[in-house]
Image (cartoon, rainbow, N blue to C red):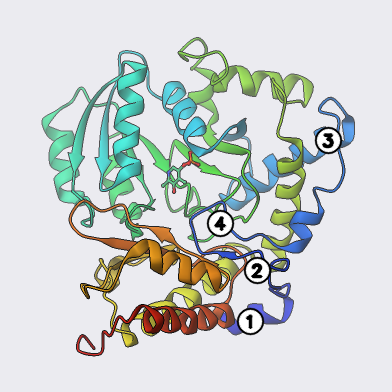
Amino acid sequence: MSKAEFLPNRPAITAPALGEPFLLTPGPLTTSLATKQAMLRDWGSWDGDFNQVTAEIRQGLLVMAGISDDSYCCVPLQGSGTFAVEAAMATAIARDGKALVLMNGAYGKRAGQILDYLGRAHVDLDMGDYLPPEPEKVAEMLDADPEITDVFLVHCETSSGILNPLKELAEVIKSRGKGLIVDAMSSFGAVPLTVDQIPFDVMVSSANKCIEGIPGFGFVIIRRTLLEQSKGRAHSLSLDLFEQWQYMERTGQWRFTPPTHSVVAFRKALEQHQQEGGVAGREARYTNNRNTLVAGMRALGFKTLLEDQWLSPIIITFFSPEHPNFEFKRFYDELKARQFVIYPGKLTIAESFRIGCIGQIDERIVLQLLRAIADALDVMGVDQSSNT
Ligand SMILES: *Cc1c(COP(=O)(O)O)cnc(C)c1O
């Protein structure tokens, strides 16, 4: 479907409140006024109305993942996304299991660290900063080591912005009968990810990325049979996903104090996600943001870290100009003074910075950003015309 088909229904993007910058970051990101306004009242965590909100968001997330029966469960968990990743891994991987961790950036590395804390055996395939894990290589590793029970991978590795070839990898992993754990933190809601296409066992995401809610909780969508088997596996009381699920099923409530405002804001954000045309609508807007951004930045002399085929519609890494007058902190401040907040890079190989395509921004705002970047380079005395 084309982008234009979604435009008539799409809620208008409005500038944030006076003086508040646009967050061109991978979350927390710029949310809509309606989402912010949903937070202007207090809720009791035991109250029936609030429990209804919890039930609605759990159901809405299952639908987004293409689940229409009770073969999967959605379990939200307080905290940032990493809390949910940690809880999911502790639940999905047996204590005597062994994981293959596919890494090509900070979030894959973090998964390895989590397994070290959990005391779970793992082997890693580390592709460095900007290359995708190759399905053939993964097949080879799985065939060579029958002890591997589960594979963890990051869908969009937010540290570079690379969109990993999830479908091809999932085929290799499932054809060998291994568990598939997907960190879809920065992609779910804007890149199609449904169980008919990607037969994952576990998928983890959070409130403050592509669904455009505010921070406060993550959520795990997990195969019911796997969750049912996981009693007693968790290493941590507060991150015990099985117990969180059981309690929620029994009472409709969160096991410990829920981030009430974040939950009601999320319901509002889900409503707007649907109005925009669901995942397809959001993907169209973010893709358009990405295309406008990359074309405009290239015209200004910037280069992307990744080749075009790996660029996600989520976040883009640009190399910092080599010009002696360029300094990231100054660049950041100049852009912030023009109402745009960007994100530092996370590469070991070169100086870089990142610009997000997600949140309440559209092409018009990206064009304003590009003008701000041109102005900032101008006042810094960074001339890249020789690069173009
Ligand atoms: C944001 C993100 C996370 C979680 O990070 P938190 O700071 O804990 O919210 C995990 N994985 C990926 C790919 C992410 O983009």
Nearer to us in this view, 117 or 171: 117
Mark 4: secondary structure: loop
Q: Quadrant of ligand 1?
A: top left
How many numbered discs sit on the rendered protein?
Answer: 4
- Mark 4 or 2 closer to N-term? 4
Quadrant occupied by the C terminus: bottom left
The amino acid beneath tag 2 is: Gly
Label 4–label 2 contact, CB within 8 A: no
Q: Which residue is mark 4?
A: 210
- Label 1 CB less than 8 angstroms from ligand 1: no
Write the residue at 58% across / 57% down. Answer: 29
Q: Which residue is mark 3?
A: 50
Which marked residue is nearer to the observer: mark 4 or mark 1?
4
Q: Position of residue 216 (x, y in %)?
A: 63, 39
User: Marks 3 and 2, how far apart in space?
Assistant: 26 Å
Q: Which residue is mark 1?
A: 5
